[in-house]
Image (cartoon, grey):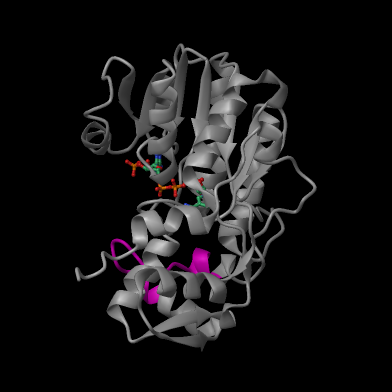
Amino acid sequence: MTTVTVFGGTGFLGQRLVRRLAAEGTTVRIAVRHPDRARTAFGAVGSERVNVFRADVRDQGSVAAALVGADAVVNAVSAYVEMGGMTFEAVHEHGAQTVAREAAAAGVARLVLVSGIGADAKSGSAYIRARGRGERLVQEAFPGATIVRPGAMFGPGDALFGTLAHLAQLLPMLPLIGGGRVRLQPVYVEDVAEAIARVLADTGTAGLTYELAGPDVYTMRELSEIVLRITGRRRLLVPVPFAVANVQARLFELLPNPPLTTGQVDLLKADNVASGTLPGLCELGIEPKAVEKIVPTYLARPQPAG
Ligand SMILES: NC(=O)c1ccc[n+]([C@@H]2O[C@H](COP(=O)([O-])OP(=O)(O)OC[C@H]3O[C@@H](n4cnc5c(N)ncnc54)[C@H](OP(=O)(O)O)[C@@H]3O)[C@@H](O)[C@H]2O)c1
């Protein structure tokens, strides 16, 4: 692939993907609403390889402009909170459909949609339902689309371990939403970026859906215990019923950067692990990195000298 447009190229995953693609000599177009953030993030990357486009997946004209002459497109746009016109439906359904339609119309050869493990068009959760419907709309508009469904992603700046560590720093206890029994299979964000790069390089992956999960399954309680162990803190783990967490999330969603959203609470109601029926990192030749190996590299607190 010589030119790849990455919608959401300044995001947690998108930044890693842009660097990965640029490093192999691909020309990358970052398509986002805030180009200034892209310039700050990628100032050091060879600017001739990384171009920035102002685009909003809800605006057909801006999507079309970002796709002219592209060989491939990756949609890594995210909306975790509904705010103003940024609804789950607008971004994950209609926005994803617009990218797919415009890519097909422009003759773009490959499309990768980043969705999530558990995406389900019939879910009772607005967020999970929109992800499932979005996948279908994209497959209809661009039949060769490849869908990648990551599990909860970890890496420096993540919303999983980073948020737990932050809460442990602020609070005398750590909340266990729904009792902390739900099971997650966290995946290293760099492994997901590598997987997408390999999908783009292999036309045999067209039309397939991949579940990208890490090597181990943990309950939320176990993940909280890991964070406490790595950060050297002792905190009481306190179960919080889903109904209470939902009310808290609704209040948090009034903040500019909510530490918890109703979409995240919904995701904690059912296990978020690979089904085992779809191909994953292994089929792409990637050995997934373990939580215990990576998370201490960015969460561990320096030990006092002596
Ligand atoms: N993080 C996880 O643990 C996780 C787990 C499973 C699946 N996923 C999925 O992985 C994908 C990437 O997630 P992430 O955590 O990397 O997201 P993120 O850090 O929140 O980044 C979102 C990106 O989307 C762009 N964006 C938002 N709204 C847009 C719009 N209307 N038009 C164009 N660009 C827009 C943002 O830039 P601007 O604000 O400048 O537009 C930003 O570059 C998402 O599909 C997410 O659902 C994430």
The answer to whether 230 appears left or right of 132 in the picture is left
The answer to whether 247 appears left or right of 179 in the picture is left
Q: Quadrant of the C terminus?
A: bottom left
Toward the viewer: 244 or 62? Answer: 244
Q: Is residue 167 above or below residue 71?
A: below
The percent coordinates of residue 120 (x first, y second) are 69, 54
Q: Please name the residue shown 32% across and 22% down the image.
A: 50
Q: Quadrant of residue 288?
A: top right
Q: Does the rendering let one see residue 98?
A: no
Q: Is residue 303 above or below residue 168?
A: above
The percent coordinates of residue 113 (x first, y second) are 58, 36
Q: Report the span colored magenta.
A: 250-265
Q: Quadrant of residue 60?
A: top left
The percent coordinates of residue 269 (x first, y second) are 62, 72
Instruction: Say if the magenta span includes residue 252.
Output: yes
Instruction: Classify the position of ligand 1 by quadrant: top left, top right, bottom left or bottom right.
Output: top left
Toward the viewer: 78 or 42? Answer: 42
Instruction: Say if the magenta span includes residue 103.
Output: no
